[in-house]
Amino acid sequence: MNIDIISDVVCPWCYIGKRQIEAALALYAQQNPGADKPHLTWRPFQLNPQLPAEGMSRQDYVVQKFGAARAKDIYARVAAVGAEHGIAFAFDKIARQPNTVAVHSLIALAGAAEPQTDDLQSRVKEAFLHAYFLDGVDLTKTENLVAIATAAGLDRAKVEQCLADPKSRQAVEQEDQRARAIGVEGVPFFIFNGKLAVSGAQGPAALLDAMRQAETAAAQTA
């Protein structure tokens, strides 16, 4: 089974959704001992494609998007849900709201690495989510992107080459546009076997059910 996950690294619900698909995969493994592990692919989506490469002040971004009072309530709710999934969101540490094209290009690099493994791409994805939401790392700075990606297992030379290559960013932007063209308006967005879609952080049970439905559909058409 192939599972494509469209998400952004500055989306807190995407971090929660990552924990939920991980829990769903653990349940799947428990219920299907010996079965092949579903193949995950992390796909890009930009919540804020209009942001410049240098990003903007996180405080200004939040106020402009939600308003100061509403933002406090929104992030308190997200933090509470995150805590239920073992994510200690530290929104107060975030100083810059970044454009995420460069980060997505590195996640794509991890997905294309040889030999291809879900673990490497998921590890790189996790590293950027953790750096941003828990450590407040500035993802607009190239040196930070290089440090995070290499610590997660990517080759430094390839990381630096990727970040310097405009084609890598163009590929991300094109994939982002394809996601919007098929109707993706919010993330996380899960696609099972290229056919069954689930939008939002739905929870492990719902994601496991979608996996079952996708398996059944595949068996019926085999």
Image (cartoon, helix red, strand yellow):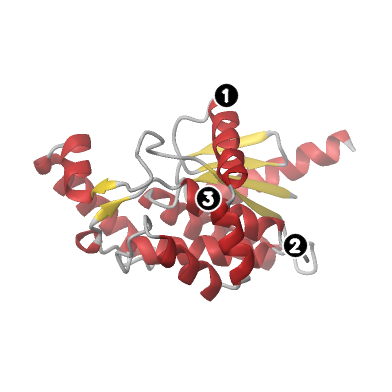
SS label for mark 3: helix
**Which residue bears the numbered disc 2?**
116
Residue 175: % across, % down:
60, 36
Residue 109 position (above or below residue 115): above
Q: Position of residue 66 (x, y in %)?
A: 19, 37
Q: Name the kind of residue labelled 3 in the image.
A: His
Q: How many residues crowd mark 1 within 10 Å: few (<14), some (14–19), many (20+)?
A: few
Residue, x 64% and y 64% (percent of image)? 158
Packing grade of label 3 (10 A; few <14, some 14-19, many >=20) is many
Kindly identify the amino acid type of the residue bearing the numbered disc 2: Gln
Q: Position of residue 5 (x, y in %)?
A: 58, 46
User: What residue sits right under mark 3 in the picture?
Assistant: 104
Give residue 172's quadrant in the image.
Answer: top right
Q: The residue under label 1 is which amino acid type?
A: Ala
Of residues 152 and 183, the one nearer the viewer is 152
Q: How many marks?
A: 3
Residue 181, label in figure: 1
Question: Camera-side residue: 130 or 209?
Answer: 130
Residue 221: x percent and y percent? 86, 34
Using the image as rendered, state which of residue 63 and residue 140 is in the foreground: 140
- Work out how far the residue at label 3 is from the one at label 1, CA to CA, in angstroms: 18 Å
**In the image, farthest residue toward the left:** 69
Classify residue 124 as left or right of residue 54. Answer: right
